[in-house]
Amino acid sequence: MTEINPYRAPDAVVESASATAVGRNENWTVGEVMSDAWRLVYGCKASFVGAMFLYLTILIAISVFKVLLGLLFGEVLWVVITGEILGQFLILPLITGLSMMAIKRVRGEDISATDCLAYYAHAPTLFLAMLLAMILMLLGSLLILPGIYLLVGYLYAQSLIVDRGQSIWGALEMSRRAVHRRWFSVALCSLIAFAALMAGLVTVVGLVWMAPFAGLVLGVVYNNLFGSPAPEDALAVDSAGLRQA
């Protein structure tokens, strides 16, 4: 008789979403990702530059609010915590929106700068997912390697919440399981994307090219790992988003 492990993470919701995905590519290479990402930069730079401007504007507003909060109430613990939580609630949907812009571009969908503002209805879920991921990565970092493994493994959890309608745990596990199969390739692509973004910060012109490229590198990897949701899944996610909004 087969014993059931009561501590095994639930996987029904994870498998149901990935099983109906279309357009996945399990044989991708890092070189192909770089080539595809660079090709896709052409024609979408203005949208990403506009989105980055919105991101920086909101980031500055959050920083000013934190300063004012500190001046009014002093640098006490509750003020610091309130400022950080508010900041995360406002920034996480923006970062997820930037990621989804890249993913949509890879899928051949039209994008605009304001697309990065489309996911604020998911802010509480995105915040809790980040919090859980940070706790698990912090625990994993006690042994060093597990922390690094989860840092890469949870890379796409936020996108899966808004793109596939996954639960918090479902998104974390779906991301980790997909990345696990190509962990070193995903880690290398992430490092290249980060290096490109840092190189772009040297000049404004460089940032116009490198910021979209960095996002598209991660977007191409996402599409290779997860594909696009089947039409019925996409409709279900859109309906859920409308209900939340």
Image (spheres, rainbow, N blue to C red):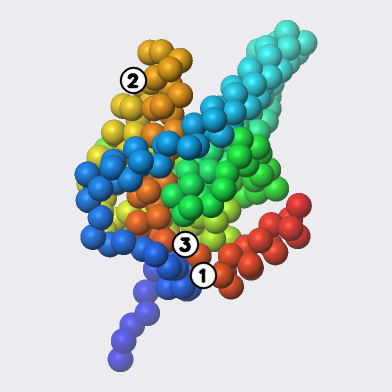
Task: State the mark number for residue 230.
Answer: 1
Report, in whole angstroms, how far the alpha carbon at label 3 lies from the one at label 1: 6 Å
Q: Is residue 90 left or right of residue 132?
A: right
Q: Which residue is mark 2?
A: 199
Q: Residue at x 56, y 70 (%)?
A: 231
Quadrant containing the N terminus is: bottom left
**In terms of sequence position, does the residue under pointer 2 or pointer 1 come before the other?**
2
Residue extending furthest toward the bottom = 1
Q: Position of residue 100 (x, y in %)?
A: 53, 46
Q: Which mark is residue 127?
A: none
Q: Residue at x 22, y 44 (%)?
A: 31
Query: In the picture provided, is 89 more to the left or to the right than 29?
Result: right
Residue for point 63% across, 17% down: 60
Q: Nearer the viewer, residue 133 or 162?
A: 162
Per the model, the C-alpha gap separating discs 2 and 3 is 31 Å
Q: Amino acid at mark 3?
A: Ser
Residue at numbered disc 3: 228
Q: Element at badge 1?
A: loop
* Residue count near mark 2 (Cα–Cα under 10 Å), binned few <14, some 14–19, many ≥20: some
Q: Are marks 3 and 1 in contact (CB under 8 Å)?
A: yes
Q: Is disc 2 placed on a helix, strand or loop? A: helix
- Contact, CB < 8 Å: mark 2 with mark 3? no
Which residue appears at 65% of the width and 45% of the height? 119
Q: Circle 3 — which element?
A: loop
Residue at the extreme front of the image, as rendered: 43
Which of pointers 2 and 3 lies earlier in the amino acid sequence? 2
Amino acid under disc 2: Ala
Rendering coords of residue 144 (x, y %): 27, 38
